[in-house]
Image (spheres, rainbow, N blue to C red):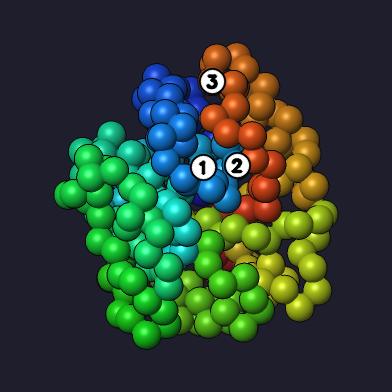
Amino acid sequence: MYTVDTLIDWYREYAPDLRTAREEQRELLAQRPMHPKLDDIEAEVCYLTVRALRPHTVVEIGSFHGWSTSWLLRALRDNGDGVLYTYDRLDHAARTLPDELTSTRWRFTHGDVRATELPDNPGFVLVDALHTAGFARWYTAALLDRLKPGVAVGVHDVFHGRCPWPNSEGAVLLRWLRARGLGYLTAARRADPDLRDHLLGVKRRLRISAPVHSGSHDPMAFFGTAEVVQ
């Protein structure tokens, strides 16, 4: 599901809409205290995944002030279909995001996701919450193991270096991926700087390379459940 060629094709196909979304996000950041945790490429890959796969149901675990949430909601809006289910123990996003994004396509649950019932059959799942090995063991078993083939997943805070830290969320996730024959893709500057540079070159050629925000926190991993080796 996630390959370099696929990402490049998505960037090219959705460049006009992505350019508009980037400008909207830049304006949102100027107006509201968003405190972005995803860097530009990570956020754009999330947006492009939703645009390309057109999932009706998207699940987001962890939103903080809603930066990733706003990107996902713009993708659903631009598709003209779909609902985002967000879970967070903090309700910052509910007070920060503008009504024009949240009024029709957002379902927010304030509380611990482990005590709630998740929607069936999501097409994209974003995990950026409690960054501990214990929480990773919970969501790999309770959520990822129950996903159907063909679901796209993004997990933040995996690659703080070339490899995940020992006994970390990232280490748990990579063991889970290896046990199921799943590959992954990351544009983290420490884990895969070549891919990151390649995507930045594509963005320059498409004239969408000016930073939306100055953050450089980019440890995210993307994978698809369709990659299971039988």
Of mark 2 and mark 3, the one earlier in the sequence is: 2
Can you give x and y, in whole percent of width and height, for residue 92 in the image? 40, 59
Q: Secondary structure at mark 3?
A: loop
Give x and y (percent) for residue 80: 21, 38
Three-letter code for the amino acid on which mark 3 is drawn: Ile
Mark 2 in CB contact with mark 1 (< 8 angstroms): yes
Q: What residue is rendered at 59% in x and 58% in y?
A: 156
User: Which amino acid does the dot numbered 2 rest on?
Assistant: Asp
Q: Which residue has dot 2 on it?
A: 39
The amino acid sitting under disc 1 is Ala
| Number of other residues with Cα within 10 Å of mark 3, as a class: few under 14, some 14 to 19, many 20 or more | some
Residue 216 pos. (x, y %): 69, 42
Looking at the figure, which quarter contains the C terminus?
bottom right
Specify few, some or many for label 1: CA neighbours under 10 Å numbering under 14, 14-19, or 20 or more.
many
Instruction: Check disc 2 and report its element: helix, strand or loop.
Output: loop
Q: Nearer the viewer, residue 76 or 40?
A: 40
Q: Position of residue 31 (x, y in %)?
A: 41, 35
Question: Is residue 208 in view?
Answer: yes
Give the residue at mark 1: 43
Q: Which residue is mark 3?
A: 208
Alpha carbon distance from label 3 to label 1: 13 Å
The quadrant holding residue 87 is bottom left
Q: Is residue 14 above or below residue 191?
A: above
